[in-house]
Amino acid sequence: MSSRTFSLLFATLALAAMPALAKPNFSGDWKLNVTKSSFGQMPAPSSMTQKITHEDPKLTTEMHQSSERGDFDMKASYTTDGKECANEGFGGSTMKSVLKWDGDTLAIETKGQFGDNEFTMSDKWVLSEDGKTLNITRTFRSSMGEGEQKLVLEKQ
């Protein structure tokens, strides 16, 4: 066996023996840092909290948001395995989401309706190295326009 073949075989076996890298765990009670976040042309909420329970592939969220328009609560259950998940959205409408891992980033594609307006929303969730900050980049599109938001949530 040549040294090159041996080296390639050794490298392949070493990679196969390495444990799979653990995906980020988003579990925790999170609070929006309004001043570090940006909402584009949308009005910022006065506050937002989110309780996340994450036992991959299961992920549930309980969100509470307050703004000048009042309070809003939403609960949702998902899986991170690429299967479509349906949850109750705004005004009792159904929102359908697909969650997939892209390395250490959780990508979420959601389709739903707000009144007569259909929308799509793409989220990218990234957990900081120390696990204390959850950064969400959100892009949304509808007949009313499109935009981008950056949400910074801090673990409580």
Image: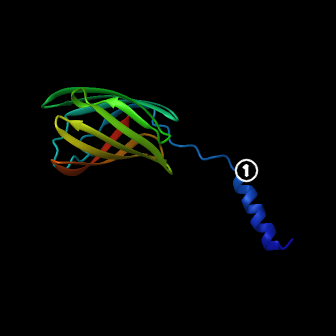
Amino acid type, residue under disc 1 in the picture: Ala
Residue 93 visible in the shown view: yes
Residue 156 visible in the shown view: no
Dot 1, how many residues are within 10 Å of its Cα: few (below 14), some (14-19), or many (20+)? few
Number of marks: 1
Where is residue 94, by image quadrant?
Answer: top left
Residue under pointer 1: 17
How far from the left and from the top, in percent, is residue 106? 44, 45
How far from the left and from the top, in percent, is residue 107? 41, 47
Where is residue 6, by image quadrant?
Answer: bottom right
Image quadrant containing the N terminus: bottom right
Residue at 28 percent across and 31 percent down: it is 89
Residue occupying the far left of the picture:
68
Depth check: 9 or 152 in front? 9
Residue at 73 percent across and 50 percent down: it is 17
Depth check: 80 or 53 in front? 80
How far from the left and from the top, in percent, is residue 74? 30, 27
Residue at 31 percent across and 30 percent down: it is 49
Residue at 73 percent across and 62 percent down: it is 11
